[in-house]
């Protein structure tokens, strides 16, 4: 293998490692790279899935029009740093993207990009993922002895370490470098507890970890005698203790090694907290969500539908902005309730001036969802088979409605009757938006027979890789 092919393969493997790892941690995620290995090299682009499409003007201004400025800035940054030290550069702040820019004496400059999904608990672990990719590329690019797939493997399985890196950095920044708790071990213990049942039930309740030096600042309800404090690594024992704090304001407190006791006080600002909620849970630093966990793995998702497509349709409609916002908030709340209760449902948002007449139970008079008692009733009615029919004035006109329509060629038999009935009805009925909530949490926004949030530009990249070209050549077809 010649040196040019080796370097291209280094980049391709690392990019695929990031993309595959983020696929499991978040959602299908495109990844792109801009780089210049040497100070005088033209900046090059590797974007096999067109992630940077739509950002051409910003890239042109930053790296071509302002080329002398960024090159000189980076040269000054690395001039006083030891060899091999990666220096983070400023964030490009590009809409819809998460990025990490870094420079070093071994690899002059690189910027990694990936998608900013709308349902992230926090973007910081993903940024740490991109930083690790930059570190590995700087090492592998100039080494001909590195196993070609080792960096790929590391990045595919980097979720826990990315979260740990973020937590360590935040705590070091605010608490200093003398923290006593081992965060990677704690994260592994949290996952192990989340997978352990007690008398057939999944874990519920809060366990938080704080530094031994801050234990005396916590107002305990009770402490366990020092010589009897169970080790956090004793997963079965910790799972049993969680029974004492589930469905309450009480919390288990650990110093990272053992369980100290139980408190009902607030969680300290930079403590690591696991909120077990059955077969899933959330990892927090203080009160800030960092990630969720389920099935023995960490995930980026808030586990709440973001329904961006629904908001866009309503804002683009003839509804006044305030009315569109109110309707969106009402529908979002109902969908989230259904998601938390783990039941499927269908909502028909009727945007016709004269409401449709649907086959089902018609309410007389229609109920306004702006009244709390009606809102609670509507949430209960969503559990009944059939669709809930509401209009743009946030009133429910019916429930248990049957949706019918002629067969269409793009039905998906893997999605079941609720989803395909909504597709057929939407394709045959103008001015309606159908929101389908599945019991396992996915939410589909269907309009004119098309599931709007099913469109995804991500596609797997296997053996074929496009050529690496200069950014100038990449932009020429767009900006000229």
Image: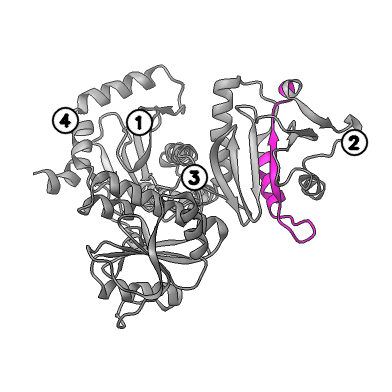
Residue bearing the label numbered 4: 65
Question: Left of 173 or right of it: where is 446?
Answer: left
- Asked if one can make out residue 467 in the rendered structure from this viewpoint, the answer is no
Question: Which residue in the protein does label 3 denote?
Answer: 145
The disc at residue 91 is: 1
Callout 4: SS: helix
Part of the protein shown in magenta: 185-214
Q: In screen coordinates, is 123 left or right of 280?
A: left
Distance of mark 3 from mark 2, alpha carbons? Answer: 51 Å
| Numbered mark located on residue 218 in the image | none
Q: At which x and y percent is residue 415?
A: 44, 73
Sort mark 2 into few (<14), some (14-19) or many (20+) by Cα contacts within 10 Å.
few
What distance separates the C-alpha of mark 1 from that of mark 3? Answer: 32 Å
Q: Residue at x 36, y 72 (%)?
A: 422
- Asked if the magenta segment contains residue 186, the reply would be yes
Q: Percent x, y for residue 449?
A: 29, 70
Q: Residues within 10 Å of mark 1 (few under 14, many from 20)?
A: few
Q: Quadrant of residue 175?
A: top right
Closer to us: 457 or 466? 457
CB within 8 Å, label 1 to label 3: no
Mark 3 secondary-structure assignment: loop
In the rendered structure, which disc, 4 or 1, sits on the residue that comes first in sequence?
4
Q: Quadrant of the C terminus?
A: top left
Please indicate whether residue 144 sits to the left or right of residue 394 in the image.
Answer: right
Which residue is farthest bottom? 407
Q: Which residue is mark 2?
A: 228
Q: Which tag is nearer the camera, tag 3 or tag 4? A: 4
N-term-proximal mark, 2 vs 1:
1
Question: Nearer the N terminus, badge 1 or badge 3?
Answer: 1
Question: Which residue is situated farthest in the front direction here?
Answer: 365
For label 2, the SS is helix
- Along the line of sight, the residue nearer the viewer: 326 or 17: 326
């Amino acid at each position: 293998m010649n040196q040019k092919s080796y370097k291209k393969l280094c980049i391709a493997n690392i990019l695929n490692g990031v993309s595959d790892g983020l696929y499991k941690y978040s959602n299908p995620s495109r990844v792109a790279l801009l780089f210049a290995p040497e100070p005088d090299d033209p900046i090059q682009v590797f974007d096999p899935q067109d992630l940077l499409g739509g950002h051409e003007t910003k890239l042109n201004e930053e790296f071509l029009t302002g080329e002398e400025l960024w090159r000189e800035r980076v040269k000054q940054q690395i001039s006083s740093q030891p060899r091999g030290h990666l220096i983070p550069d400023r964030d490009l702040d590009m809409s819809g993207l998460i990025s990490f820019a870094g420079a070093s004496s071994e690899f002059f400059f690189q910027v990694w990009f990936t998608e900013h999904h709308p349902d992230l608990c926090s973007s910081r672990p993903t940024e740490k993922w991109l930083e690790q990719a930059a570190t590995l590329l700087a090492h592998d690019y100039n080494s001909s002895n590195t196993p070609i797939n080792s960096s790929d493997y590391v990045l595919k399985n980097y979720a826990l370490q990315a979260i740990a890196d973020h937590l360590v950095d935040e705590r070091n920044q605010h608490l200093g470098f003398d923290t006593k708790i081992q965060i990677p071990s704690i994260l592994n213990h949290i996952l192990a507890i989340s997978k352990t049942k007690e008398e057939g039930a999944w874990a519920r309740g809060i366990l938080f970890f704080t530094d031994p030096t801050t234990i005396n600042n916590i107002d305990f309800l009770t402490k366990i005698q020092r010589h009897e404090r169970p080790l956090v690594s004793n997963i079965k024992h910790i799972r049993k203790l969680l029974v004492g704090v589930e469905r309450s304001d009480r919390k288990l407190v650990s110093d990272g090694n053992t369980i100290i006791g139980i408190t009902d006080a607030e969680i300290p600002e930079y403590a690591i907290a696991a909120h077990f909620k059955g077969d899933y849970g959330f990892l927090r630093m203080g009160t800030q969500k960092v990630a969720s966990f389920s099935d023995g793995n960490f995930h980026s998702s808030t586990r709440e539908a973001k329904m961006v497509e629904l908001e866009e349709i309503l804002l683009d409609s003839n509804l006044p902005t305030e009315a569109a916002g109110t309707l969106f908030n009402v529908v979002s709340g109902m969908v989230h309730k259904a998601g938390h209760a783990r039941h499927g449902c269908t909502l028909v948002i009727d945007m016709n001036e004269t409401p449709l007449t649907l086959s089902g139970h018609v309410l007389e008079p229609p109920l306004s969802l702006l009244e709390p008692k009606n809102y609670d009733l509507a949430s209960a009615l969503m559990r009944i088979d059939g669709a809930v029919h509401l209009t743009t004035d946030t009133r429910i006109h019916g429930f248990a409605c049957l949706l019918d329509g002629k067969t269409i060629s793009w039905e998906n038999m893997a999605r079941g009757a609720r989803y395909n009935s909504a597709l057929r009805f939407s394709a045959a009925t103008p001015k309606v938006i159908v929101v389908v909530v599945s019991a396992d949490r996915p939410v589909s926004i269907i309009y004119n027979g098309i599931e709007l949030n099913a469109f995804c530009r991500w596609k797997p990249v296997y053996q074929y890789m496009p050529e690496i070209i200069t950014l100038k050549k990449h932009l020429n077809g767009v900006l000229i």
